[in-house]
Image: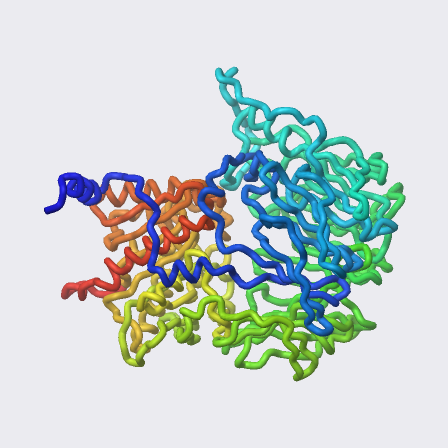
Amino acid sequence: MRSLFAVSLASLACSGLAAQQPYKVPPQVIVDILDTPPLPGASVSPDRQWLLLLEQRSMPAIAELAQPILRIAGTRINPRTTGPQLPGPITGLVLKRVADGAERRITVPAPAALSFVSWSPDSRTIAFVQTRDSGLALWVADAATGQARALTGPSLNATNGPPCQWMPGAAASTRLLCEFVPDGRGPAPVAPATPVGPTTQETQGRASPAPTYEDLLKNANDERLFDYYFTAQLATVDVATGARALLGAPAIFERVDVAPGGEYVLIARTVRPYSYLVPAVLFAQDLELWNLRGEVVVGPRHLPLGEGIPIRGVRPGPRAINWRPGVPATLVWAEALDGGDPRTKVDHQDRVLTLSAPFNSEPVELARLVKRYSGLLWDTLGTGLLAEYDRERRWLKTWILDAAKPGAAPTLLFDRSAEDRYGDPGFPVLRMTAAGDPALLRTGDWIYLVGSGASPQGERPFLDRLSVTTKKAERLWRADTAHYESVVALIDDAGRTFITRRESHTEPPNYFVRRGNRLRPLTAFKDPAPQLTGIEKRLVTYTREDGVPLSGTLYLPPGYRAGTRLPVVMWAYPTEFASATAAGQVTAAPNRFNIIRGPSHLFFLTQGYAVLDDPKMPIIGGDTANDHYVDQLVMNARAAVKAVVDLGVADPDRIGVGGHSYGAFMTANLLAHCDLFRAGIARSGAYNRTLTPFGFQNEDRTFWQARNVYLRMSPFVYADSINEPILMTHGEADNNSGTFPINSERLFAAIKGLGGTARLVMLPNESHGYVGRESVLHTLAEMIDWFDRYVKQARPRQAGVSSSNR
């Protein structure tokens, strides 16, 4: 007989009362896979003679996530270390010599918690940051010997990103410029025990649409904390001796960037007024140029507070400011000609400007763009690739720009749909200059392009070379159909020999040196999860009822026997398209190795399920696609279900659907608007679009401009139609724009109030994605338990209940 205590617990569970329970653990096979460290990452040295392997731990413990943090000005920091919330994830550094594969392990401090790893421009030294209990310390390692040593104590300030960069020019590879906690900073501000008054905001007739940012400043004490933790002191550090030389006065630095010649430093200082509506990156800034004595030689140029930027607009004034590689001190930037508002009708939205030292003349205009500036890459000879993006058409133009001919019209290179993956010419190959700046790799008339090589049969990565004179491309190499092999770096400037990352369905990823058809292995990583051996993977293509071609990747569990109908998990994420042709393109890579990490839905394969991964969910129609969101969503789902049923794989009475973020939004909508699925899993979703009234995803219209669209798309409005069981998980500290935890709490309350079946799991200390070991394992345990109960063990539907659209 059960005890009264056990009966009481069972009654609590059945009544739907909230309770905090210990973390669950999924089946041991999943625990073993996740506890195995992932395969190392890799970084190629600037001289292309070394491959640096970055070994990483599997997952942080929840105890690390539970450490006190500050959620301030759009950022999360650890106040104890004046750096990122979590310690560095890298546990080891291993050097592989490209010439012969010889291996050397770098001695690193114990316990290793490394981050911000960077090569010196001359490839002789590797800098990295070590997390200690009391702060962040700078270390350097000698590539020739593998010996590492500390250059500083735990005094770096990394609240605003990487704290150190290599100096170029005369000090190239011998000094680093770093941000430090100012000496004598004193204790942190403490909030007054008694409020001095209310926090007040006011608006007076000026429209200031604001996205739904998280972790913003809330009061005067937050402002003081922001000043305290984000203020840094710049100093150069000598690699040989560790000696420091201070540079300027302490400030809050949004940007610090040294010119290639090493004589000037581009500075963006954050200044008041601060905002309670936008993160620190949009606070007011003063742009300045300093010399190496910390003196302001140009500026300041003031950028006002970035509140009120129009939807899909840009900040007025200089933006995307960069030093041009190959010359000592030349700045290039973009400026809006429409005030940053795309609704303003002008002949040209943007212009590109340049200015060289000594910066005492007027800027020179390099180009005017009809649409919005989208980036600029230079070689060291003054040729640039200038990108222009037309969001309305989802169209991308790439121009060849000649810095030696200011005012001359740029030459059109590419003119294509940004959605067209089959026609993607690839991304230019870059290499680091002697000053440490990335620049286009150019050999004579040629630049090089690498791409994923999307095709109707899946991806086949490639390497091309392109003449900047004729604008014609030549294919140098393309991966075969059995392997997924992508170019990591060219070893010689002619593109004859290069490093690749190569894998297949049965071979784990490894690094190779390729010359023509000859391959030489650099690494020999083993399968980190042999438990997954035997998983079958297929590219599945099918057609929506309106003729749009769709695709997905079907995974079958080990030991699957043809003709056996299985419970199926369908996991997806909707995407808007302007073109039906682009929406139907295949994006899968069926010849890639199966690596499963985190709370992946692919772990259902260990439990006897089939998984239809990333079945395409296109919403077609450009800027008004969401007018038909629900109809197209259901059409997509109906086609995917039919495809796996017709293949003889899926039991039509045992199909579940799930997704994360916008995929969770999709899941709730599908359960509300069709009866195709027996249950759903929705992780970290937004279910009430009135909580994101100034747009979401690719929706530009506000709630007040498209009220019916927002309401029709909100599954919260249709909670009374969610008549299949839904599991919702959400990080209590979700920091993603728009996916407030209250979304899941309110939808659960609605379903509960209406008598539906739902479970809500709120994960302590987790953000939008779940990283803590206990959280990841618990999420997988919940997912498997839920689908085992409501999908795998589901009884056939009653007569009269169809799996078609309601």
Q: Is residue 144 above or below residue 191?
A: below
Q: Which one is nearer the viewer's eye here, 396 or 731?
A: 731
Q: Give left or right: position of 612 versus 580.
A: left
Q: How is the image coloured?
A: rainbow
| Residue at the spot 64% in from the left edge and 49% down from the top edge | 109
Total tally of numbered discs in the picture: 0
| Residue at the spot 28% in from the left edge and 42% down from the top edge | 750
| Residue at the spot 34% in from the left edge and 62% down from the top edge | 634
Within the image, what quadrant is residue 795 found in? bottom left
**Rendered-image quadrant of the C terminus:** bottom left
Q: Which one is nearer the viewer's eye here, 6 or 598?
A: 6
- The answer, for residue 584, to whether it is visible in the render is yes
Q: Is residue 45 above or below residue 514?
A: above
Residue 73: % across, % down: 57, 35
Q: Give left or right: position of 99 versus 161.
A: right
Residue 203: % across, % down: 54, 27
Q: Which one is nearer the viewer's eye here, 229 or 521?
A: 521
Q: Which one is nearer the viewer's eye here, 419 or 11?
A: 11
Within the image, what quadrant is residue 14 found in? top left
Within the image, what quadrant is residue 119 found in? bottom right
Residue 241: % across, % down: 81, 44
Q: Give left or right: position of 349 versus 61.
A: right
Residue 657: % across, % down: 33, 60
